[in-house]
Amino acid sequence: MLEHEATLCRKGGLILGLSMRQLAELAGVSRGTIDRALNDRPGIAPEVRAKILQLAQDHGYRSNRAGRMLRLNKSPLLIGIQMPARNNPFFQAVRAGIEQAARDLADFGLSVVWRTMPGYDSAAQVRQVQELIQAGVHGLALVPIDQEPVRRELAGLAAQEIPVIALNNDVSDGRRLCYIGNDYLHSGRIAAGLLGLATGPDPVPTLILTGSNQILGHNQRVSGFRETVAARYPWIQVEAVRENLDDDALSFSLVMEHLDGHPELRAVYLAAGGVAGACRALAARGLTGRVRVVCFDLLDETARCLRDGRITAAISQEPERQGYLAVKTLYDYLLDGTRPPDRIITKNEIIIREHEDVSEHTAAGQRRIP
């Protein structure tokens, strides 16, 4: 008896496997008829069987998916999600993508369970990952903290053959199935280029605010910025690099403190979150527009700051797509072993006040600048 493949459909712009019900609706027959056609059983007219098999072929043919997807309806796949920086609005956009993928795949036997935490604490991340494993997840997507306890935990998960997606941030020398997110080194270079084009040739004393030195991507954004400045924009003079933990209140305090000792400040580069806090500090000192600000991600507050001239430019990185792809990639791997590339890189998009192609989104995501 031959087990045929499920067809594929497009949903939300990404390829998903059809359920038996959906294939039956396409063919205008019952699910029992679909089962007989796909599995070469008797009791079906030849022309009906041919029609069903043609639909399967037309929509893309992948081995063994029909049977596996039917079994998932009885024993669903469970994916665990772990994210730090709970109060960072950027991760709300990532979460929106994850939740959309979970809704799209719910009919195909998938569900998602969450753990989140404030700040960047490697011990807390390991503890929450272990809680997810105890909850029976078949795979994980997490925003990994680049510290040895987390790397050891990833190595242990790999030994247990539990697939892990490094979401939004990667780890150095870490065991994971795939990284899905931004090219942080490249985005740091873009930020340096934007600030270089907006300033010079007079000296530009600059403050760098990064999220956390424990996050590989944040460090790469700082490195990419510094190397490009040194090579092409020598008038940009970095006075200090400070961690704000993606926190607006801490970002406000750090800028105010820096201005007390360096009133000549002329640029702020934010390699992660805390953008609104930095802008409020500059406004409090009457420096809006006089101090150039380059940052990342088009969140609601960032859009307002761009509109008001408080930010020179922002660089977006498709956070919702990152979240969606993390769930979809894990699903495909768990379903039939479809192995993704080592890295799936989302695009950088430069946003300025005059930008006219910014998509309209909710408060959890990106937003059009009026």
Image (cartoon, helix red, strand yellow):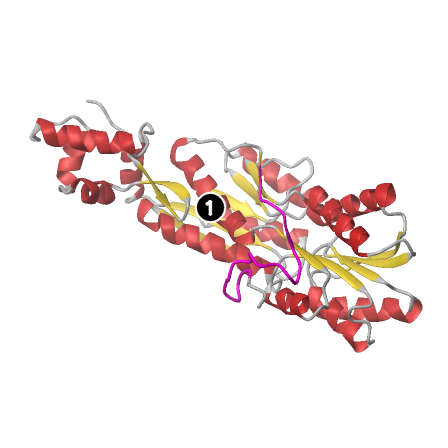
- Front residue of 211 and 156: 211
Is 57 positioned to the left or the right of 126 in the image? left
At 68% from the left and 71% from the top, the residue drawn is 308
With respect to residue 246, does 3 lie above or below? Answer: above
Residue reaching furthest top?
A: 1
Kind of residue indicated by mark 1 = Val
Q: Is residue 271 magenta?
A: no
- Front residue of 99 and 236: 236
Query: Percent position (x, y) of residue 344?
Result: 56, 38
Label 1 sits on residue: 327
- Front residue of 13 and 92: 13
Span shown in magenta: 344-366
SS at badge 1: helix
Q: Is residue 138 visible?
A: no
Q: Is residue 361 magenta?
A: yes
Callout count: 1
Q: Main secondary structure of the magenta part?
A: loop
Query: Percent position (x, y) of residue 227?
Result: 82, 42
Residue density around tag 1, few if under 14, some if 14–19, many if 20 or more, within 10 Å = many
